[in-house]
Image (cartoon, rainbow, N blue to C red):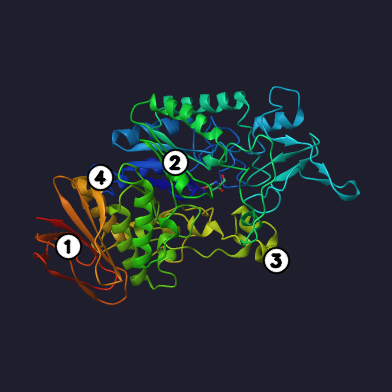
Amino acid sequence: MYQVYPRSFADSNDDGFGDLPGLIDKLDYLNDGTERSLGIDAIWLSPIHPSPGFDVGYDVADYDAIDPIFGTLDDFGRLVAEAHRRGIRLMLDLVMNHTSSEHGWFEQSRRDPNGAYGDWYLWRDGRRGRFGRRIPPNNWSSFFGGSAWTWDEVRGQYYLHTFLPEQPDVNWRNPAVREAMLTMVRGWLERGVDGFRLDVFNAFFKDADLRSNPRRYRGRRPYDRQVHLYDKDQPELVDFLAEFRALVDSFPGSMTVGELFSSDPIGAVRLSAPRHLVFDWWLIKTPWKAPSFVRASQMREAMFRESGWPTVVLGNHDQSRLASRLAPRADATTSDEVARAAAVLSLSLRGTPFLYYGEEIGARDVAVTWEEIIDPPARRGGRLVRRLVPWWNRDQARSPMPWGRGGPNGGFTAGRPWLRMAPDVDTRNVAVQDDDSGSVLNAYRRLLWLRRRHPAMQVGTYRHVPTRTPDVYVYERATDDETIIVAVNFAAKERSFGIRTSRRWRTLFDTHAPDGAASREISAGGELTLQPRQAVILLGA
Ligand code: NOJ
C-alpha cells in the first residue's frame, strides 16, 4: 500500500500543488507491471475533496466532489480506470469524524437548530461558572490544543471539535448522519474505489451523556492529561463498523484500514477483521535499536496472534520521515543505509506494509521556517504557546516529491511549490536513484517484486531467531513450501553471529550487494557476518 499525499506528489499544471492528472502520469512509476517500476499494489490517497484547508484537506467541505486544485470528477474517473488497468487498487481517505465548518451541513446546522440538520453536530448550551461566566459543557480537550468546545455566536451554543474549531465533530448517534455517510461511501464504491482509510474512526462515537473525562496527572500536553474514557472508544462503534463493513464487502475485492486514534494498540486487534485492517502504531514509534524492534514485533505477534493480520507502518503524513526518525542527524550515506535496512523490515515483517510517498527515495524531514509553517496545530498559538503545547510541525514530512526530470524544484513544478522542497532535491530524487543500482529506490523495487515471488515474505509465519548479538535482529518467515531468514544489523559496526540451522541458505536480497544478490552462500550451522547497517534476506534451500 502506497500513501500519496496529493498536494505533494506530482503537479501537472505548474500551480505548485500536486494533482490527479499528475498522479496519473506517475502510475507507471508506481507499477507498470515490470520490475523497472516500484511494484506497489494499491494507493491510499490522502483527502482530495474540496476543503478550506485548515487541516490541509482533513477538513472536508463536500464529500462528493473533488477539490479543484486536484482536478475534476472526470480526472478521478480516469485515475480509477488507469490505476485498474495496471492492477493498482485505489483507496480514499474517509474523514467522517468531523466535517469542515464550511460544509453545508454545518452551515445549516448552526443557522437552524430546528431544521433538518439541527442535530447533525454536537451542540450544547454549556454551563455557568463563577460570576455567571459561560464555560464549556465538559472538560474535553482538543487534540490540537485548547478546549474541544467552541462557542458559536450564530447558534448561541457550544459545538464539539476533537481537532480544530474549523473541524466540528458530527453527531454519529443521529441516524440521518449515518445514512448520509453510508450513501456517500456507496457512491465512491460505485465509482470504482477499492477501499478506504478511515480517519480517527474510534472517535466517531462519544459518551451519550458527554461526561467529563477523569484527569490524569502525567502527560506533556493537556490532551494527554486526561483519561479519554468518554470522548472516544465507545461500544456503539462496533455496530456501525458492522454496517459499514457489510457495505464495503458487498463490493468484492474491497478493503479498509482504520486509523486508531491515540488509543491502546490492543484496540487495533479488537477492531480488525478479515480485509478490514487497523493501524496499531507500534513500529512507527520504535527507535533504531535491534532489541526495540524485537520487542515491538513480539508485542505485535502476541497481540494479533497468527490468525490476526496487522499493518506494517514506519511512516505517514503525521510523523517524522522514516529516515530522519530512525537516523537523526545522519549524513546522506548513513541515512540511506538505515533507509534500506528499514525497507527490508517494512517489506518482510508480518502484515500489510504501508509506504509513505518519498520513503522509497529515503526522503528526510525538511526544516520549515516559522513564517512558512502551514500545519495548523504547529502554527496555533504562536511561538510562546508552542513551548507549552508542543506540537511537531507535520509540514516537515510533507515536502513535494522530487522527480528530478530537470528544471527547478526537482522537477516537481515550474511554479512555486505549495511547501518548501527538500534542500537535497538535486541529489536525492527519482531520476538520480533510478540510475544507481545501490539506491534506496532500487532496494524498494527489488524488495517489492521479491515479495510477490516469495509467499514466505508475505504470508509466512513469523518466528524470532535469537542470537547472542544484541545488535542484530533475526527472524524467520515460513510457509509449507519455503522458509526465509531476515537478518538486520542495527549497529554502526560489523557483527558476526551464528544461526543454528541444518539447512543451506542462499542470499535473496542484500542491502550491501545490490547487483550480486545471490553471491553469498551460508552452509548449515554457518556463521554470518553483517557489515554496519546491513540487512539480508536468505532463502532456505
Ligand atoms: C488524523 C490525520 O492523519 C491527521 O492528519 C489529521 O490532522 C487528523 N486525523 C484530523 O483529521
The residue tagged 1 is 515
Q: Earlier in the sequence, mark 4 or mark 1?
A: 4
Q: Earlier in the sequence, mark 3 or mark 1?
A: 3
Q: Nearer the viewer, mark 2 or mark 3?
A: 2
The residue to which callout 2 is attached is 270
Q: Amino acid at mark 3?
A: Leu
Indicate which label's residue lies in the foreground, 3 or 1. 3
**Amino acid residing under circle 1:** Asp
Q: Which residue is mark 3?
A: 384
Are the residues tagged 2 and 1 within 8 Å (C-beta)? no
Furthest toward the right, the residue is 131
Residue matched to label 4: 459
Whichever of callouts 4 and 3 sits on the residue coming sooner in the sequence is 3
**Badge 2 element:** helix
Is 482 situated left or right of 154 in this image? Answer: left
Q: CA distance from mark 2 to mark 3?
A: 40 Å
Callout count: 4
Residue 510 in percent (x, y) is at 21, 63
Which quadrant does the C terminus fall into? bottom left
Indicate left or right for 378 with 248 as reference.
Answer: right
Above or below for 184 versus 98: above
Cα–Cα gap, marks 4 and 1: 26 Å
